Amino acid sequence: FGGASLCWLTAMQSVPTVEPGEPMLRASRGSRALRIAPMLALLVGAGLFFSRPAEPPPSDIKLAIGKPFVQGIISLFDMKVDNILLQKPESQWSHFAVGMLAFDLLIDIHMELLFFGAQATLASAEIDLLFRGQRFGTLSTRPCPLGGGGKIKTQMAGQLVVDQLDVFQKIARAVVHEDEFTVELFSVVTVELRGTDNGCILRKDMCKTIGSARIPGVTFAKSVVLKGAQGFSVEMGALKLIDLPATEPAGKALISVDAKVTNPSSFELHDLDVFSIDIYTDDSWPKTERPAAESLGVKFAEVNTEAGFSLGKGESEWFAVQGFLSVPEREYDLVKTADVLNHFLTSRPTPLIASIAGSSQPFFSAAAKGAALRAFLPGMKHDFGGDTNIVVRAYIDLDVPVAVASLLNPLTGTTLHQYLYVALSNPFDATLYVCGLEAEVMFNGAHVGQVSLPQLTLEQAIVLPPSERGFLTPNAYPIELHATELPSLLQLLHDIAPQPAGKGVAYVDLNARIHARVGGAEPILVYRQVNVSAQLKQFSGLP
């Protein structure tokens, strides 16, 4: 018995202890062997003890070898987290009222332990959680089954109460942006052991003991590596603008965008409910060395997810976010918003940043507020007419022979002043108000003229209903034809001449600046109108 006691004493003196906040480092194979050695000595001593015919009372055995035996097993194993499910508790308002946050967690873990020789359970505990040496909250766990040791998979359930919001927000950023990060757990726990006569349901070779033991004061200190979401890889669908009922013209329109995300993290996020998101231009594009949160440009939209929103692991289904254009009435902001619409209308992807403004759930609102995610808004698809032009046709009031003679006469100058009617289309699903237009006319890559529509008030604006195709302006507008590139201009006049002298139609490009109002914003749409047909009014069938 004395030799066995010496083995147990050696084991007790060799069990490592860890203080709260101390970093947990993975042991090398050699150091791990040194740590396991006293445990083996302890087990040998325990075997010698049980082989003696004169046994002390079971309670003496528990007190003599229980704690060092269990402490050694708990100290040596590595805990791996497979999944963390977060969902709202039945009530969290009592915590929220005193400046704390609470949420329920269900953690899937796996581990490899030395064998207990009995069925083990980690009793309910209050576990301190630390991130990079800073405590951010407490995990109040329910009893967690540990089996009899060996390779096991189990679940740890409980409620996370956050009382250090600044640290909690740091770990939330790690969840969103990082590949992986480490969280430290520390507590002094109780381990319960049950033998064959007290409910052990393990197979016989793993449950050779009798009686039961409750071992308090066991130090539980672990570092767990968790996977981050790496920015969630946000993918956006096409932008949609839909008119809302309004008592005045040119009111707000509903903006709707479909999105999906990929979540490779360790976290399964239930009960996110309604997330509010501000959409900004990316001020660092095309250079993205700066983090998204430091690259916020102009906020041009405010959107929300639908109620009951949740986010599982892996690639999500498409989900809708809806809201409104929200652009300050400042020239810089309007220009930046116009850039987004210009990219959209010319079928080019636009770099954007989605910044979380808050959530209807206080826990997630505190965690996610201010988190910024990069995404690209795809350009408009050419679903109609092969383009997204607003100007689609021009009808010029012109006598071709007279115009050609005037251009070739050095005494009459090199500019023709004429008038034209314009047919306009609306590529949006919301009403478009055209308040003015200036455009450089290009033919075969050469400058041949200038078109100008006067600036109109909102009451005077040309109103294009959603998806309008080919609305003809009731008034004629001035066009100047310039002979600076005389061969190109003469070719244009030849092409628009009626057959058989000409083709009856020519196609020009317009480098246009269109003053518009759509969805409650007033951007200047600056983009090229391609392949605009030009015809002579008197041969077009127009009155």
Image: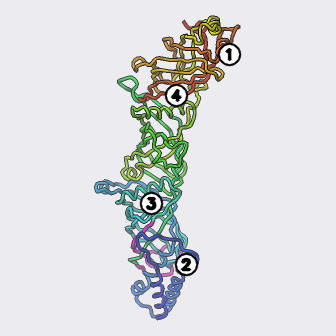
Q: Which mark is residue 526?
A: 4
Query: Residue sitting at 52 percent across and 77 percent down?
Result: 115
Q: Amino acid at mark 4?
A: Val
In the rendered structure, the answer to whether residue 319 lies left or right of residue 398 reads left
- Which residue is tagged 1? 487
Q: Name the residue rendered at 37%, 46% in the picture.
A: 360
Residue type at tag 2: Ser
Q: Are marks 1 and 2 in contact (CB under 8 Å)?
A: no
| Viewer-closest of 188 and 135 | 135
Q: Which residue is mark 2?
A: 31
Tell me where residue 106 appears, x and y as whole percent. Answer: 44, 60
Magenta residues span 184-213
Quadrant in the picture for residue 401: top right
Q: Is residue 453 magenta?
A: no
Q: Nearer the viewer, mark 1 or mark 2?
A: 1
How far apart are the alpha carbons under marks 1 and 3?
77 Å
**In the image, is residue 382 above or below residue 321?**
above
- Which amino acid, mark 1? Pro
Give the labeled residue for mark 3: 106
Amino acid on which disc 3 is placed: Leu
Q: Between disc 3 and disc 2, whose residue precedes?
A: 2
Identify the secondary structure beneath mark 3: strand
Of the image marks 1 and 2, the number of the one nearer the N terminus? 2
